Amino acid sequence: MRIGQLIADLTFTQARLRASFAEEGSARIQAELVREAARVMDAIERYVPDTEAELREQVQFFMIRASRAKRSVTRERDTEIALRLLHRHSPQFRTLAPRQEVAHPRSPAPRNAAPSSDQRMSSYVFHSPERVCAVDRDYRYLATSATNASFNRRSQVGMIGMHVVEIIGLSRFNDRAREMFDRCLGGKVHEYYYDLQHEDGTTRIIRCQMKPVHDEIGTIYCALAYMTDVTEAKIIRL
């Protein structure tokens, strides 16, 4: 299993746990989620990278965690793990010079399978061939497809944990996206259209379809957003 998939697994588990606490859900389920999160975190720390890119993603994950940690002991521990991973694995690779790398999607799943609560949503999103992302109730990315990460000139792992504002900007978030996410996280399946200005001066029409994702007892813990360029289809209709 690739390191990116493990990290996505962790963020989905943590999102379910946060949603369960917010809704005062089952203590049994919360305990199971805590154990699952600990298991995946241990797997991330023990993961042996196959490539230089995977090592960068692994180290980046712990450094980002350290930068966001509120407790100094957590910050120091995650920094120590990142440095230990570099010391242990970097000799097998020639360089750690930064460069943008985006994983190609594997094992794509059909869209009509996405809302099923018994699926591994992280795997579905991470390997989807479409431009799709999962956003939690705090408007942070749990996972994104390779296509969407590439569109935003980011890596899949790099987008995990980022706030939507960091990708689309504060103006777009306040003017439209926040309301749309709130509607979806409130349980509504919906879609809307927006214009997107490209660097070459052209304007594209994007359809965004949003679907809420529930856990096994019905608590909504994230929203799936599918972005599709429908410019040509709109022109034909006109």
Image: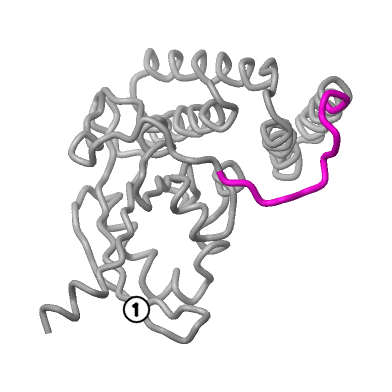
Residue nearest the observer in this picture, 207 or 231: 231
Question: Which residue is located at x 34 percent, y 49 percent?
Answer: 130
Is 235 above or below relative to 120? Answer: below
Question: Which residue is located at x 37 percent, y 17 percent?
Answer: 29
Side of 6 relative to 113 (left or right): right
Q: Is residue 49 magenta?
A: no
Q: Which residue is mark 1?
A: 195
Residue nearest the observer in this picture, 30 or 227: 227
Query: What crowding class fits label 1: few (fewer than 14 Cα within 10 Å), some (14-19), or many (20 or more)?
Result: few
Residues rendered magenta in the picture: 90-102
Is 191 above or below relative to 123? Answer: below
Picture quarter containing residue 203?
Answer: bottom left
Side of 99 relative to 132 (left or right): right
- Residue type indicated by callout 1: Asp
Q: Quadrant of the C terminus?
A: bottom left
Q: Is residue 101 magenta?
A: yes
Q: Position of residue 217 (x, y in %)?
A: 24, 25
Q: Position of residue 32 (x, y in %)?
A: 43, 13
Question: Which residue is located at x 56 percent, y 14 percent?
Answer: 39
Question: Which residue is located at x 82 percent, y 40 percent?
Answer: 96
Picture quarter containing residue 118?
Answer: top left
